[in-house]
Image: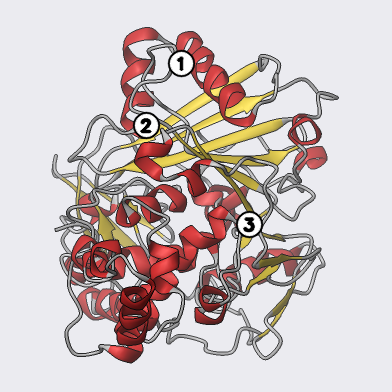
Amino acid sequence: MTVTPFSPELSWIPPMEYGGMRLNPFVHKRLFNLIKKRALYHGEVCTADADNATVDCVSSLLPMEVGDIRYRTLRPASEVGDWLESSRINTSSALYEAKDCTNQACGISNYGIEAIANREGSPYDTCVQLVVGLRYYYSTVNTTDVPDLWIDAMSRLDASNCGTSDADFAAFDDKVGMPGWCSLVTMFPDPAAAVISCSGYDMDVNTVTYNGVSFLMDEVVNANGASKLFLLKNGGMQRLAQSLLFENGQVQVAPLVSKDLVAIEVEGRDTTALAANAAREALNVIAGGTEANNNDNNASTTTEDDRESPMLRLTFADGSSVLTKRAYLTMLPSDMTQVRGLESWVPVVRDSLTPSMAVKVALFWPKGTDIASLLGLTPCVPGPCQRIILDGPSRSAAGDPWMVRQVWLWDANSILLYQLAPMSNMSLPAHQIAKFANERGMGETVRVILTQLREGTGKNLPDPSAARLKTWAGGSLLIDSPLEQPQWER
């Protein structure tokens, strides 16, 4: 799913390529400064107010709502419980406060132990409350013996610990410091699996870490407060990177393909030291901090003129080399660490690389076919985003592999399916889409996806006019979260 040709008519719609998903201007300050610089070139001044968590950059950034979710599972109630099975796409949240937004976080979550005590929330809300409750217990009541694995963390607080009587419930609630906990957790036959289902991101319940699930739920469903995520307009991340090659006038670009890059050198500079400084900043972000460089989001974005900047020497396996002022590298993170001069990035990749693979399927309908209205939801453009998280059995009623998990209403006429899966379980939906498309073709893949969308939403969606597929192999994705080594999965 490559970057699309630039169209002024569509420049306000963020592209669906992976790098166009989202950024946090208060964490990724180098990136935000580059966005400000490009905006300034076009006459727009972008600012970020950390005190009020607002970003004024409306022609370049679109707020991305991630917490206003509608959920449905088609797994049997015997597996997920009557309560979670009752959720439908018209079941709205009782604990998530969504609001219109143009330059700030779009919604605020009201999850917490008070809501657990008061037995508040929709089926989906209570599913999120499971991870909120675990985090409260391991950060407040029991801080010295925190299990490494998610399944172990949940097993210590699942229904098997609650007993059967009201007195048993009350005693365990008191032990974990959360009135109402047993009433909550007993609604879920398998609470560890339920949270992963509700996240929309498939993980191996037996190997994913407790911190991995906890931080992911903050990032992707706003389980703790409000996220500050924005989508990049005007062509997305790829076009932003490409524009850097032209920022000082017309520059000749020479794509180098089928070349094996083995070394990078900044002439006249200590390349290793420069790479190490950048790697330290990245590790700081992974540890939950922000980029050390330019702590002021509104500081000057001036960079040294090309006439004064040093030359880069790129050396290739065939013995050839190239001198250039700028280079746009498109290699995978795991390959980058093999390049001489970038060895300092090994711990960055090691500490933040997920072995999961990922898949995107973009579905497009003719202009005037308002898919979002048909579903009764608001698309990301103009926003704020609403999305559907679906789950299903390994095989649908029609006998096809289940494929649909996260359904983003991108704009009125398009839907984006985005999902990932660990390499340890090839039966998960992301793998099934890739496998089915390879073996049966896109036509059959779209047919199955539409059948499952209709079944999951209860809406008679028309066939799309076009579709695109993009897959990423395991080891392609860096996760911007403070996870423990070896990070995502054990």
Q: In the rendered image of this protein, does residue 215 appear above or below residue 204?
A: below
**The residue tagged with tag 3: helix, strand or loop?**
strand
In this image, 127 relative to 263: left or right? right
Residue 39 image offset from top left, x and y in percent: 72, 65
- Residue nearer the viewer, 231 or 257: 231
Quadrant of residue 54 in the image? Answer: bottom right
Q: In the rendered image of this protein, does residue 181 appear above or below residue 19?
A: below
Labels 1, 3: front one = 1
Three-letter amino acid code at disc 3? Leu
Q: Report the disc number at residue 231.
A: 3
Q: Badges 1 and 3: C-beta atoms under 8 Å apart?
A: no
Three-letter amino acid code at disc 2? Pro
Q: Badges 2 and 3: C-beta atoms under 8 Å apart?
A: no
Mark nearer the N terminus (1 vs 3): 3
Report the colour scheme: secondary structure
Residue linked to disc 1: 445
Labels 1, 2: front one = 2
Q: Which residue is drawn at 25% across and 89% down?
A: 143
Q: Which residue is drawn at 25% across and 43% down?
A: 474
Mark nearer the N terminus (2 vs 3): 3
Q: Report the disc number at residue 429.
A: 2
Quadrant of residue 461 in the image? Answer: top right
In this image, 400 relative to 117: left or right? left
- Residue nearer the viewer, 250 or 285: 285
